[in-house]
Image (tube, rainbow, N blue to C red):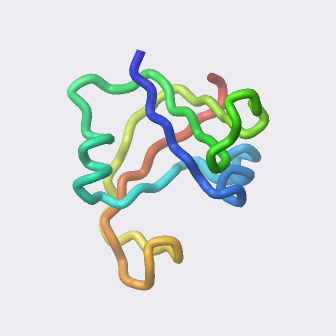
Amino acid sequence: MRILHLHVKKKYFEQIKSGEKTHEYRLANPYWTKRLVYDVEPELVIVYCGYPKKTDSSKVLIFPYTGVITIANFRHPEFGEKPVKVFAIRLQEGA
């Protein structure tokens, strides 16, 4: 089974957990293109709050993989002041 693992900061983890944040964003650079443009798509997305211990399930969220979209001219403080191209990974409850 193919799984996409994403590590996020605590504030974003809490927003995803509450349902306030429904997408996770990654820069559309060679590193993330290699990981997000698949021949075979993953079945699950696992989101971690930082890098938790294996036994700490409170810092892990599991979602079904529902696809990735590309967004141009995206602005966010984490990516700097200029607009950038990003991958938006959809996160849905229920897995």
Which quarter of the rendering shows the N terminus? Answer: top left
Instruction: Pinpoint residue 54: horizontal percent, then vertical percent.
Output: 68, 30
Residue farthest to the bottom? 81
Image quadrant for the C terminus? top right
Q: Does 72 appear above or below 53?
A: below
Judge by depth and name the residue closer to the eye, 27 or 69.
Answer: 27
Q: Relative to residue 67, is residue 89 depicted above or below?
A: below
Residue depicted at 32% across the width and 41% down the height: 36
Q: What residue is rendered at 21% in x and 27% in y?
A: 39
- Residue at the top extreme? 1
> Where does the image place residue 4, in percent across and percent down from the top left?
44, 33
Please report the residue visible at 68 percent of the width from the left and 35 percent of the height from the top. Answer: 60
Say which of 91 and 32 sits in front: 32
Q: Is residue 84 left or right of residue 7?
A: left
Residue at screen point 53% across, 49% down:
23
Q: Nearer the viewer, residue 33 or 65?
A: 33
Rendered image quadrant of residue 37: top left
Q: Position of residue 73 (x, y in %)?
A: 33, 72
Q: Residue 9 vs residue 69: left or right?
A: right
Figure label count: 0
Position of residue 88 relative to residue 37, above or below, is below
